[in-house]
Image: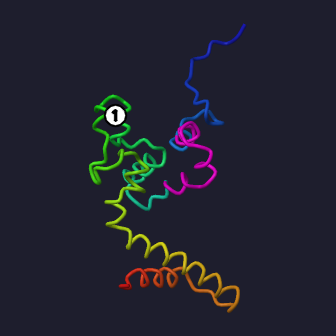
Amino acid sequence: MKEHREDTIVWKFDKKGVFSTSSFLQVIQSETLTDEITSYSFTSAIWRSVVPPRVELFGWFVLVGRVNTKERLSRLGVIPNSDNVCVLCKKEIESVQHLFLLCEVTWKQEQKKWLTEFFAVIWNILWERNDRIFRNKEAGVEEIQSRTVYETNIQY
């Protein structure tokens, strides 16, 4: 005869059976993210506490396409299908991809700044790499960051 034991709750997604935010996020991400996204370390890069938690969460929602854009709201029946046009450019359907990557209004306003920062970062990565390989020189992290910030502030 078996002993009478009290029922317990076991979180099946953890080896020890204990719920944790980390194990919950892993389950959610594995169920909602494509292999293309999870094959890179985008998801782990989001949860680094470099911005407030609500901004991290929003970034995650953008990544998994769960932002309540007008396109999503119309699919869910919250707003009529005829009301899914982007409120910024008034030309395209307001999807996550359009709103955050393709919308001409948001892109044109920030394009020069974003491109300048992008090119400054990749240029300084290459510069530092070449210094280490060909000149046997190694700058510290602060120096590389300062150089990159300086270059993004140059008016072209």
Q: Secondary structure at mark 1?
A: helix
For the rendered model, the colour scheme is rainbow
Q: Residue at x 60, y 80 (%)?
A: 126
Check the image and report above or below for 6 versus 128. Answer: above
Q: Where is residue 141, by image quadrant?
A: bottom right
Report if residue 40 lies within the magenta region.
Answer: yes
Residue situated furthest front in the rendering:
91
Residue situated furthest top in the rendering:
1
Q: Nearer the viewer, residue 133 or 72?
A: 72
> What's under tag 1, amino acid-wise?
Ser
Residue situated furthest right in the rendering:
1
Q: Residue at x 37, y 52 (%)?
A: 99
Residue 104 as seen in the image, left or right of residue 6: left
Q: Residues within 10 Å of mark 1 (few under 14, many from 20)?
A: some
Q: Main secondary structure of the magenta part?
A: helix
Residue range highlighted in magenta: 25-46
Residue denoted by label 1:
74
